[in-house]
Image: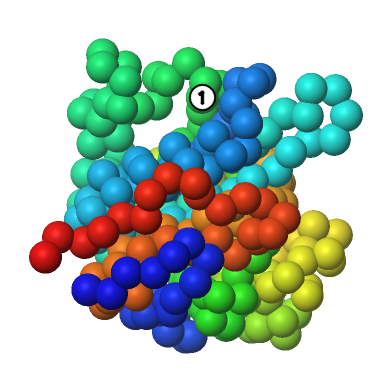
Amino acid sequence: MATHAYGAGPIKGYEVGPIPMEAAFTSDFPLAEGVGVQEIVDKQEVERRVMDVRPGMYAKYMPSRIEEGGAGTHFTGGRYLFETWDDVLDYERFTSEELEFEPGVKFWSRPFFLNVERFVWRVAGAHNFLPLEEHHVSRFERFRYEGDADLAVERAWASLRDEAEARGLGAVWLLHQPEQRLIGIHSVASREASAGLEAEVSLGSLLPESLAAERYFDRTSRILSLWLPKSRLAGGVPSAYPMSPPLPLPTVPVQVPAA
């Protein structure tokens, strides 16, 4: 398997077009004060090597948004796609019940992860319009809704996909959590289109009126890193840092595959 320096080398195994994944996982949380951007970049690159080998993971987008003013809170988390519902449940179980990077501290209970919100989702649709090398900024929105959404969400997918393509977006996912009556929309833009992503009318405006969908979360972020298990297995880069610069590259040693 070839090795590549951070920020260099090809991404392999990811195509433009429909993404045939059934499930997703998302997390959102602020980091505790004093955790620097370089520190979290290095941590996630080392920890990726344990986490992205879980069954069925397609990719992870790790967001980074630092609020201006005050303490400059750093918000991060993850947006993942998985092949099957069983795969995403396995990931939730593994990270909640088994994974420890500090002895005796489960992953989601780390003291520098504050007020973690995480969800497992069913995927109504997902599509890449641009190569992953051009995925630089992401927007994630969550909506509460009323009524029966199963068919309504599936029928809304074609309209959302077509509108995302018309806007020149890099990718879009439509997610559904019927047990909690939630809908999620993850949209991605290139560096050139990133300035308008946050200001654009929400793709949620295309959800059927019958759902009475109410948006309660909306965050646009730079993409701090991409975890790319399909690329790793194909001999490409295992991770990418599309917004470096200005965000930093890892300073930890590059992973060397076993012979």
Q: Is residue 49 left or right of residue 157?
A: left
Question: Amino acid under label 1?
Answer: Phe
The percent position of residue 117, horizontal first and vertical second, equals: 51, 32
The residue most toward the left is: 259
Foreground pick, 42 / 64: 42
Residue occupying the point 55% across, 60% down: 241
Placement of 252 over or under 239, stated as above or below:
above
Above or below: residue 12 compared with residue 220: below
**Rendered residue at 62%/50% (across/down):** 248
Residue 92, quarter of the rendered image: top left
The answer to which quarter of the image holds residue 84 is bottom left
Name the residue rendered at 66%, 83% in the picture: 165
Q: Indicate whether 20 appears above or below 16.
A: above
Residue 101 seen by the camera: yes
The N terminus, quarter of image: bottom left
Above-or-below relation of 15 to 37: below
Provide the secondary structure element on which disc 1 rests. Answer: loop
What residue is shown with label 1? 113
Name the foreground residue: 83 vs 51: 51
Residue 146 in the figure: left or right of residue 254 = right
Q: Is residue 178 visible?
A: no
Point out residue 68 in the picture as x, y percentages from the top left corner.
Answer: 85, 35
Q: Quadrant of the C terminus?
A: bottom left
Q: Position of residue 251 (x, y in %)?
A: 49, 46
